[in-house]
Image (cartoon, rainbow, N blue to C red):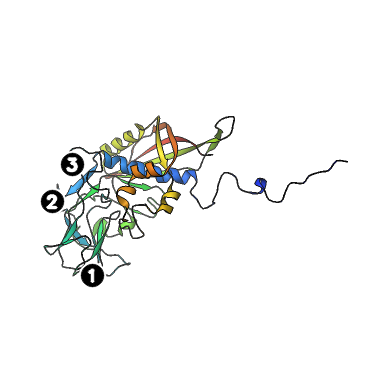
């Protein structure tokens, strides 16, 4: 007599394969976080930053070391003071590859000619590096003179989602003489969180287009497409950045795992964009690669397209590449 054996209730045939937690980042999202970090670090590492000293004027005039009163509905008027550029360097001097000059570390801020060091108790504040601003615990007078020595990055690297639909592209952000010190005026009127300053590199990772067998014993390659949108105010910058993207063809980069980084608590910023205590060196891109290595990613089939002039001061170039990662 034949006895049929029914499969046990549950088992691998009833569960999702190749994931341990449905809320962990999948490879497509891991690629997005890594490509943003890779290019943000890469441009900085090649010396693409500006040091702002006291005093310092731009080529068109203006005082780049002076912060201006910013309007933010989340704070009392007088608490938030912003620089003419966002994306301040937080990685610390001595930690980038530039040989001629290192970024300026923010050691404190001048208020009406009096210097207040970071961590002081008489006029406490914190630095919001991504949005390029200083936020005081207590509001200052609107007539205060707030000055700061800092460094800002040249290229703003952002996820393409929400650009330009949610965020406002700001032209002329290097022109600090034009209405910068006038609160609520010009391109600085919108919130820093909803503003993209040029040049900008917006990155989009398309969901996996296919999987390929890795070897006879198992495993699969995941193939993705990555799209780069380069937005600049002149043709030269757009060409330069697009060429830089294409030069990364036929190479391997290492990926970190954003989920394990988040669990470990070493992401550089907290909820209000203030530097975490262990941001340097643990939160720097090379350290996250060393300490939270995930997979190797092969970049191939890089290609560019024509550069379009959308307005007298707005150019856009598009570049693509394919990636291959042993995801499973």
Residue 105 visible? The answer is yes
Horizontally, residue 97 falls left or right of residue 296, namely left
Q: Quadrant of the N terminus?
A: top right
> 10 Å neighbourhood of mark 1: few (<14), some, or many (≥20)?
some
The percent position of residue 82, horizontal first and vertical second, equals 23, 59
Horizontally, residue 248 falls left or right of residue 76, namely right
Mark 3 = which residue?
101
Q: Taking 11 as reference, is 247 above or below it?
A: above
The percent position of residue 175, horizontal first and vertical second, equals 19, 50
Mark 3 or mark 1: name the one nearer the start of the chain: 3
For the residue pair 250 and 303, the one nearer the viewer reads as 250
Mark 1 = which residue?
139
Which structural element holds mark 2?
A: loop
| Residue at x-position 30% and y-position 39% | 238
> 10 Å neighbourhood of mark 3: few (<14), some, or many (≥20)?
some
Q: Residue 141: which quarter of the image? A: bottom left
> 10 Å neighbourhood of mark 2: few (<14), some, or many (≥20)?
some
Mark 2 or mark 1: name the one nearer the start of the chain: 2
Labels in figure, total: 3
Mark 2 = which residue?
56
């Amino acid at each position: 007599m034949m006895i049929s054996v029914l499969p046990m209730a549950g088992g691998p045939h009833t569960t999702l394969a190749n994931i341990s937690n449905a809320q962990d980042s999948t490879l497509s999202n891991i690629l997005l976080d890594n490509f943003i970090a890779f290019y943000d670090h890469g441009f900085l590492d090649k010396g693409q930053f500006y040091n702002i000293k006291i005093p310092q004027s731009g080529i068109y005039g203006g005082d780049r070391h002076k912060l201006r009163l910013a309007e933010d509905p989340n704070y009392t008027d007088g608490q938030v003071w912003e620089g003419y550029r966002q994306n301040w360097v937080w990685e610390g001097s001595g930690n980038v590859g530039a040989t001629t000059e290192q970024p300026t570390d923010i050691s404190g801020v001048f208020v009406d000619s009096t210097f207040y060091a970071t961590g002081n108790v008489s006029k406490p504040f914190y630095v919001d590096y991504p949005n390029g601003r200083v936020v005081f615990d207590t509001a200052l007078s609107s007539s205060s003179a707030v000055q700061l020595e800092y460094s800002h990055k040249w290229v703003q690297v952002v996820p393409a989602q929400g650009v330009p639909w949610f965020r406002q592209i700001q032209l002329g952000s290097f022109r600090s003489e034009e209405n910068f010190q006038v609160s609520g005026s010009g391109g600085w009127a919108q919130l820093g969180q909803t503003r993209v300053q040029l040049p900008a590199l917006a990155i989009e990772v398309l969901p996996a287009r296919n999987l390929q067998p890795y070897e006879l014993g198992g495993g699969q390659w995941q193939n993705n497409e990555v799209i780069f949108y380069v937005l600049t105010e002149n043709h030269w910058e757009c060409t330069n950045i697009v060429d830089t993207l294409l030069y990364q063809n036929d190479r391997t980069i290492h990926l970190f795992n954003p989920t394990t980084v988040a669990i470990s608590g070493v992401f550089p910023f907290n909820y209000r964009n203030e530097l975490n205590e262990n941001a340097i060196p643990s939160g720097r891109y090379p350290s996250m690669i060393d300490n939270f290595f995930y997979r190797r990613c092969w970049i191939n089939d890089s290609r560019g397209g024509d550069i379009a002039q959308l307005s007298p001061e707005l150019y856009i170039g598009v570049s693509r590449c394919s990636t291959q990662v042993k995801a499973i």
